[in-house]
Amino acid sequence: QMKKQCGQKLLVQMKTECVPCSLNLKTQCLAGYTKITNGTGIPDCRYYLEIKTHTLSFPGCRHHCVKEFEQPECCQGHWGPDCMGK
């Protein structure tokens, strides 16, 4: 008996924490995510350092990561937890 499942693929994007660009070479994505940026990543962020009473902000880099997962859904005209309802 055919399962009446029509899953959708979802692409979830995330960005790693902003760090000094020279340190970002070694940055890894979270487990299960794939890094889609190379080298030192993308210089589109700022990171902060607290020095005594001051907070300084510096340009930094971060990586972009993606993860693909299936969202199970019933095909049109079917319903229920097992998609067997019509």
Image (tube, grey):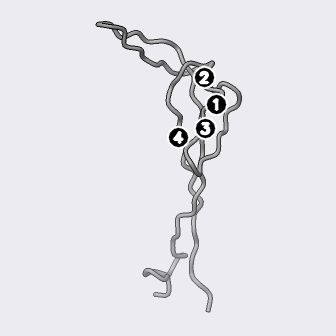
Q: Is residue 63 left or right of residue 86?
A: right
Residue 26 badge: 1
Residue matched to label 3: 28
The answer to whether residue 58 is above or below residue 11 is above
Quick check: 9 above or below 72? above
Spatial CA span between label 1 and label 3 = 6 Å
Q: CA distance from mark 4 to mark 2?
A: 19 Å
For badge 4, the amino acid type reads: Met
Q: Are marks 1 and 2 in contact (CB under 8 Å)?
A: yes
Q: Are marks 1 and 3 in contact (CB under 8 Å)?
A: yes
Residue nearer the viewer, 55 or 3: 55
Among numbered discs 3 and 2, the one appearing first in the sequence: 2
Give the residue pinned by disc 2.
23
Image position, residue 38 (x, y; %): 70, 31
Residue at (51, 21) in percent of width and height = 45
Mark nearest the camera among 1 and 4 is 1
**Disc 1 from disc 2: Cα separation:** 6 Å
Q: Nearer the N terminus, badge 4 or badge 2?
A: 4
Q: Quadrant of residue 55?
A: top left
* Residue at mark 4: 14
